[in-house]
Image (cartoon, helix red, strand yellow):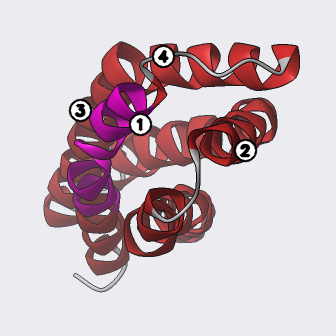
């Protein structure tokens, strides 16, 4: 059972790391870049980024949650309650991230994607971007803590 837990945890870690890296990039780089461009460029860049991200990144996000749940179950079943609790903590953090994403970021992603593809600039483009950015630090921290919990679950 240990090897199956380890494989599930590693797959969870790798998948969570993809989303963590994406959120850190947005917090550390894209936020500043978008602040320096005009509204049309903001809408085109962010909207088209969301267009591709919302199609390509769910596989990593879903895999991260599923493998973290699997690692949690396998740890408890294999008699490693500390690893199980750490994996459960990771799952809880990922679920909080998912709620924030679904309620705040995803609707903004859709609005900016639709605007970019229609080649229009919404009057509230900057307001939308500021709202999206208002949770990016929290999202990155949640993903980072989930990643840390999963890594520690491998060594306890």
Q: Kindly indicate whether the residue at mark 4 contacts the one at mark 3 (C-beta within 8 angstroms).
A: no
Find residue 123 and name its label.
4
Mark 2–mark 4 Cα distance, whole angstroms, equals 20 Å
Q: Residue 115 at x, y = what percent?
A: 71, 17
Mark 2–mark 1 Cα distance, whole angstroms, equals 13 Å
Q: Give the range drawn in magenta.
A: 126-143
Q: Residues within 10 Å of mark 2 (few under 14, many from 20)?
A: some
Side (left or right) of 31 relative to 42: left
From the image, tell me which residue sits under label 1: 129
Local secondary structure at mark 3? helix
Closer to the chain start, of discs 2 and 1, is 2
Query: What residue lies at 57% left-to-right and 40% top-to-bottom?
Result: 39
Query: What residue lies at 23% left-to-right and 42% top-to-bottom?
Result: 134
Q: Residue 116 at x, y = what percent?
A: 77, 26
Picture quadrant where residue 93 is located: top left
Mark 4–mark 1 Cα distance, whole angstroms, equals 12 Å
Mark 3–mark 2 Cα distance, whole angstroms, equals 23 Å
Q: Is the magenta stretch mostly helix, strand or loop?
A: helix
Q: Nearer the viewer, mark 2 or mark 4?
A: 4
Find residue 96 and name its label.
3
Q: Kindly indicate whether the residue at mark 1 contacts the one at mark 2 (C-beta within 8 angstroms).
A: no
């Amino acid at each position: 059972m240990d090897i199956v837990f380890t494989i599930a945890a590693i797959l969870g870690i790798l998948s969570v790391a993809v989303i963590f890296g994406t959120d850190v990039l947005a917090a550390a780089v894209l936020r500043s870049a978008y602040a320096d461009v005009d509204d049309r460029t903001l809408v085109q860049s962010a909207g088209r980024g969301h267009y591709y991200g919302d199609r390509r990144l769910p596989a990593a996000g879903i895999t991260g949650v599923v493998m973290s749940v699997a690692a949690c179950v396998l740890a408890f079943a294999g008699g490693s309650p500390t690893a199980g609790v750490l994996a459960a903590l990771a799952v809880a953090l990922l679920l909080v991230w998912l709620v924030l994403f679904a309620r705040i970021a995803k609707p903004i992603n859709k609005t900016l994607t639709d605007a970019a593809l229609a080649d229009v600039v919404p009057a509230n483009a900057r307001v939308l971007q500021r709202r999206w950015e208002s949770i990016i630090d929290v999202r990155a921290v949640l993903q980072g803590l989930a990643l840390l919990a999963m890594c520690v679950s491998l060594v306890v």
